[in-house]
């Protein structure tokens, strides 16, 4: 039974103890990083650094071809561990480096993964340390392909990629774009940061697997004339963090976003809108088909009733300040909650004071099961926030932290309420 005020700090990664870095999203994970022969091997050095920064322990294994591009010294210096390169290393006590290494990992990540490596892994070939430990693995395998576009598009490589996916191997990318050989197309390795985020997502519990989830995020912009309008300071970061956390948890996420400078999280379908009226249209079109609706957007309550089609001129008004007549916008969240078969609705309330009182009032007025309160001084615009969740069982404060960590805790709470 929950108390009136129930502290959910244990569900917030890194938030339960003051001396833990909440951004260390791979804390305690042992990652075996396989590096194969390709020009993108240099990017694996940056990836090693990012993995370590995220709290992972990294053991690098290089193929002979990889060592033609980058030396093991680079990876040893970065990871702080000797790099393994030899299946026949006499220095390994039981002479079974392939077994020891694969048993010691939470995941094997191969980046870059050459066409040759994919072919070997798809066919179960084991003729060097990396391919042998991959065959002997008991842990998940993720691979970031990197090769010339023709090599990637070759039917043989496509068959191998398909077999690997069917075997449960997670292929990350490849990306499209300019290649080291001067050609352009699909085959570039994802950037190190993208690979890191995909690995973090891979480890998140799939508590919303296959759920259809609709989110609004960012501000709206209500036109006064073609160049001016009414908007607010929402950056979209909280809503985008939630979209990412929900997608990591296995949900099919559609993000209806007001104007922001942010990129959509991987795997999230983003619909761009400008005004509250457009946001309303896009949300209502999809709401009945969604299982969960989270309204994070800072939607303008009013819009100019008669936006001018030409730019308003100061001199035409002879010094009289213009009066802008306002008209009420639809309350998107309240209308979704009032549908005959509404999705599970989650609202947000940003207040500058009296958070508990105002948030509880909004939850009742909009007739929704869960509202998330935050103070604008904590959450508007920045990377961090502090949330309190208000539901039928009472108030559940989450400790302050990065928006992505809070978003994951909120996703866990929603999943708990749904189950
Ligand atoms: O974007 P960031 O910089 O990361 O900042 C995040 C945030 C502070 C904007 C976010 O965490 C937040 O609190 N969003 C809700 C803002 C707010 O207070 O909205 P409100 O009180 O006007 O509305 C309450 C709820 O109704 C919200 O879920 C809102 O999306 C929804 N609403 C409001 C008006 C309207 N016409 N339609 C709506 O759906």
Image (spheres, rainbow, N blue to C red):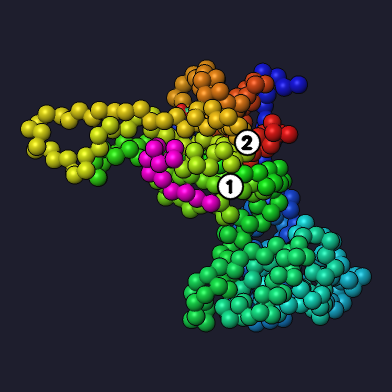
Magenta extent: 269-281
Q: Is mark 1 within 8 Å of ligand 1?
A: no
Q: In the picture provided, is 318 more to the left or to the right than 68?
A: left
Residue topped by disc 1: 253
The quarter of the picture where residue 78 lies is: bottom right
Question: Which one is nearer the viewer's eye here, 346 or 33?
Answer: 346
| Residue sitting at x 55%, y 30% | 339
The quarter of the picture where residue 340 lies is: top right
SS label for mark 2: helix
Residue topped by disc 2: 410
| Residue sitting at x 61%, y 26% | 369
Quadrant in which the C terminus is drawn? top right
SS label for mark 1: strand
Question: Which one is nearer the viewer's eye here, 94 or 359?
Answer: 359
- In this orientation, does residue 380 appear? no
Task: State the image coordinates of residue 295 (x, y, percent, origin top left).
Answer: 52, 35
Mark 2 crowdedness (10 Å alpha carbons): few <14, some 14-19, many ≥20:
many
Task: State the image coordinates of residue 382 (x, y, percent, origin top left).
Answer: 47, 40
Task: State the image coordinates of residue 163 (x, y, percent, origin top left).
Answer: 74, 70
The quarter of the picture where residue 117 lies is: bottom right
Question: Which one is nearer the viewer's eye here, 124 or 79?
Answer: 124
Task: State the image coordinates of residue 385 (x, y, percent, origin top left).
Answer: 53, 35
Figure disc tally: 2
């Amino acid at each position: 039974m929950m108390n009136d005020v129930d502290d959910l700090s244990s569900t917030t990664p890194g938030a339960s103890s003051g001396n833990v870095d909440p951004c260390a999203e791979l804390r305690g994970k042992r990652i075996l990083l396989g590096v194969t022969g390709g020009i993108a091997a240099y990017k694996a050095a940056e990836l090693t650094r990012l993995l370590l920064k995220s709290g992972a322990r990294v053991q690098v294994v290089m193929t002979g071809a990889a060592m033609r591009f980058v030396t093991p010294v680079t990876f040893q210096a970065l990871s702080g561990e000797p790099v393994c390169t030899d299946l026949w290393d006499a220095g390994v006590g039981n002479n079974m480096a392939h077994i020891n290494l694969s048993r010691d990992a939470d995941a094997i990540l191969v980046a870059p993964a050459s066409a040759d490596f994919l072919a070997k892994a798809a066919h179960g070939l084991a003729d060097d340390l990396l391919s042998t430990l991959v065959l002997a693995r008991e842990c998940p395998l993720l691979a970031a392909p990197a090769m010339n576009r023709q090599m990637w598009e070759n039917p043989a490589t496509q068959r191998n990629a398909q077999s690997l996916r069917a075997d449960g191997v997670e292929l990350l990318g490849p990306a499209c774009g300019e290649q080291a050989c001067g050609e352009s197309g699909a085959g570039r390795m994802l950037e190190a940061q993208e690979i890191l985020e995909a690995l973090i997502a891979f480890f998140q519990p799939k508590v919303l697997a296959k759920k259809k989830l609709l989110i609004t995020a960012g501000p709206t912009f209500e036109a006064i004339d073609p160049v001016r309008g009414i908007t607010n300071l929402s950056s979209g970061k909280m809503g985008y963090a939630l979209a990412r956390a929900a997608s990591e948890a296995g949900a099919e996420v559609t993000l209806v976003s007001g104007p922001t400078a942010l990129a959509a999280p991987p795997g999230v379908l983003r619909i761009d809108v400008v005004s509250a009226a457009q946001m309303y249209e896009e949300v209502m079109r999809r709401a009945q088909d969604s299982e969960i609706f989270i309204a994070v957007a800072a939607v303008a309550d009013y819009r100019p009733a008669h936006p001018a089609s030409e730019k308003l001129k100061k001199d035409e008004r002879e010094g009289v300040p213009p009066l802008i007549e306002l008209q009420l916008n639809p309350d998107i969240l309240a209308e979704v909650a009032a549908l005959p078969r509404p999705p599970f609705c989650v609202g947000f309330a940003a207040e500058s004071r009296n958070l508990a009182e105002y948030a509880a009032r909004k939850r009742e007025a909009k007739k929704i099961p869960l509202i998330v309160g935050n103070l604008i001084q904590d959450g508007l615009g920045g990377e961090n926030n502090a949330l309190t969740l208000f539901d039928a069982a009472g108030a559940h404060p989450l400790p302050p932290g990065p928006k992505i960590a809070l978003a994951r805790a909120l996703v866990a709470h929603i999943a708990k309420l749904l189950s």
